[in-house]
Image (tube, rainbow, N blue to C red):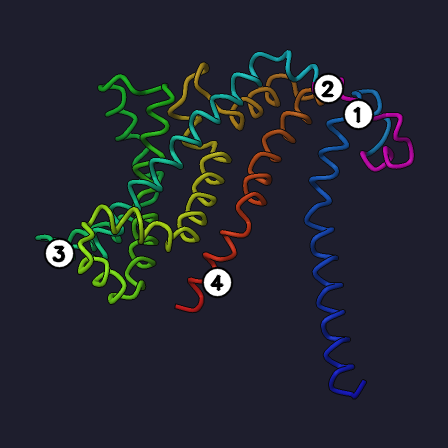
Amino acid sequence: MNATALRRALGNSLVQAFLVVVGLIWLTPLAGLLLSSLRSTEDTARGGWWTALASPGQLSFDNYSALLGNDGITRAFWNTVLISVPTTVLVVVIAALAGYAFAWLDFPGRDPLFLLVVALLVVPVQIGLLPVAKLFGQLGLFGTIPGVVLFHVSYGLPFAIFLLRNYFAEMPKEMLEAARMDGGGEWRIFTRLVLPVGRPALASLAIFQFLWVWNDMLVALLFADSSAQPLTVELQSQIRQFGSNIDVLAPGAFLSLIVPVAVFFAFQRHFVQGVMAGSVK
């Protein structure tokens, strides 16, 4: 092995070792939360979560049994699902349709309307909280899951449309013209050509939108009542009320964390493809 190959091998080894260290540091809080969720309140009071590594007999699923018996936590979990999934689907579908229209369809006012969409990106969420709350109160949507979903969709669309429009606009024009010459209509081109090619961007957008909504507390704290509040608000409420019920809070927090982590790793390949595609265009 010559000197150049040796330096390259050492460099690759150092990079891999560094990435392993970063990965372990990133996973440490997750591992700590998991072990804490499997320990009793007495064991938690006696020492930190790392003591379970030397005494695995501390670990059990009793806390998760208690979690399933907590009506507030389980209701909040399903509320979170009912908020996050419809919001993500609606944002991706509407943004894909609008992005294709702004990229490849000619209609009156297209460019000024797209500039308006871009301008909405700079509007902070906090500005619209009180006016939208008043409007939702008049419409009967305040405090309901549909109201929370509608708010997230309306504020998520500007960025989603901007992202997908720019991605779709980079597609080869000749590819779409060839499809039109073969007799394909706009809807057929959109569903059979644009969506499959744009799958990495759609997956990336879906991941970001899902994580944003799943972890949100500000909007839900204002727009959801006690029967519609998601997991983030319920956990915060239980911390404020009880403070020391770690046997419920730890598994609840781990449940709140593991779902977005699982979603990210499930769509990791598409996410990486979308990032790489955006970097080379």
Q: Farthest residue toward the left?
A: 108
Figure quadrant of residue 248: top right
Amino acid residing under circle 1 = Arg
Q: How crowded is mark 3: few (under 14 residues within 10 Å), some or many (20 or more)?
A: few
What amino acid does circle 2 point to?
Asn
> Residue 106 — which label?
3
The earlier-in-sequence mark between 3 and 2 is: 2
Q: Of the residues under marks 2 and 4, which one precedes in the sequence?
A: 2
Rate crowding at label 4 as few (under 14), some (14 to 19) or many (20 or more) other CA atoms within 10 Å: few
Q: Name the residue under label 4.
A: 276
Q: Which residue is drawn at 73% across and 75% down?
A: 11
Disc on the earlier residue, 1 or 2? 1
Q: In which quarter of the image is residue 178?
A: bottom left
Relative depth, front residue between 192 and 171: 192
Q: Do residues under tags 1 and 2 come within 8 Å of each other at their CB atoms?
A: yes
Give residue 38's position: percent from left, percent from top: 77, 26
Inspect the image, locate mark 4, and give the three-letter code of the amino acid beneath it: Met
Which label belongs to residue 63? 2
Of all residues, the one furthest to the right in this rendering is 54
The quadrant the C terminus occupies is: bottom left
Q: Which of 228 and 68 is in front in this view?
A: 68
Which of discs 2 and 4 lies nearer the camera? The answer is 4
Tell me the crowding category of disc 1: few under 14, some 14 to 19, or many 20 or more residues within 10 angstroms, Cα based: many
Q: Picture coordinates of residue 68 (x, y %)?
A: 64, 15
Residue that appears at 72% across and 64% down: 16
Report, in whole angstroms, how far the alpha carbon at label 3 lies from the one at label 2.
58 Å
Q: Distance between the residues labelled 2 and 4?
A: 42 Å
Helix, strand or loop for the magenta stretch, by majority: helix
